[in-house]
Image: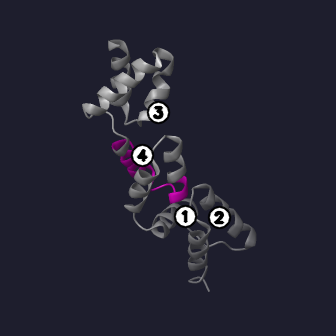
Amino acid sequence: MNELRSRAIRLLARREHTRAELAGKLATHGTQEAIETVLADLERSGLLSDARAASAYVRGHAARFGAARLRQTLRTKGVESALIEQQVAELPAEIERAREVWTRKFGSAPGDAREWARQARFLQSRGFSSDVIRRLLKDTAEPAA
């Protein structure tokens, strides 16, 4: 049990983990009930927090990804929906984040339909919504006219 707790603390020392992530990483090192006991103890002592893990992930990745990608990743990490929506709601406007990502990658308006589609695919792969992508690429094309 002490070895399991030590392993969990070492993992948490590197970065914040959700309860589900930590349970997965500890699964091969102990029984299910021992893992649950350790996780409950870590939560009681404040060392393990899904809210803190979600917040840290969003802070670290919001500048590169859209809301859809952030939501999906947090879901796979085992964060509950209400907590995900709370974290995403606190982000700056998605259009501004998309503009920063687009500027770093491209910096100039698409010259033709093929380039427009390439830029749109890139932004979509980063988790930005179609509406945001359309507005962003439309706005960048207008000043050139």
- Residue under label 1: 102
The dot on residue 57 is 4
* In-front residue for pair 2/55: 2
Quarter the C terminus occupies: bottom right
Q: Secondary structure at mark 3?
A: helix
Q: Does the stretch in magenta take in 28?
A: no
Q: Does the stretch in magenta take in 59?
A: yes
Instruction: Count the labels in the image.
Output: 4
Q: Would you place residue 77 above or below residue 127 in this image?
A: above
* In-front residue for pair 94/78: 78
Q: Would you place residue 2 above or below residue 39 in this image?
A: above
Give the CA separation, mark 1 to mark 2: 8 Å
Give the CA separation, mark 3 to mark 1: 31 Å
Whether tag 4 and tag 3 are in contact, CB under 8 A, the answer is: no
Whether tag 1 and tag 2 are in contact, CB under 8 A, the answer is: yes
Does any portion of residue 47 appear in the rendered image? no
- Residue under label 2: 119
- Residue under label 3: 21
Q: Would you place residue 140 above or below residue 53 in this image?
A: below
Closer to the chain start, of discs 2 and 3, is 3
Looking at the rendered structure, the kind of residue marked 4 is: Tyr
Residue 55 lies left or right of residue 97; in this view the side is: left
Closer to the chain start, of discs 1 and 2, is 1
Viewer-side label of 2, 3:
3
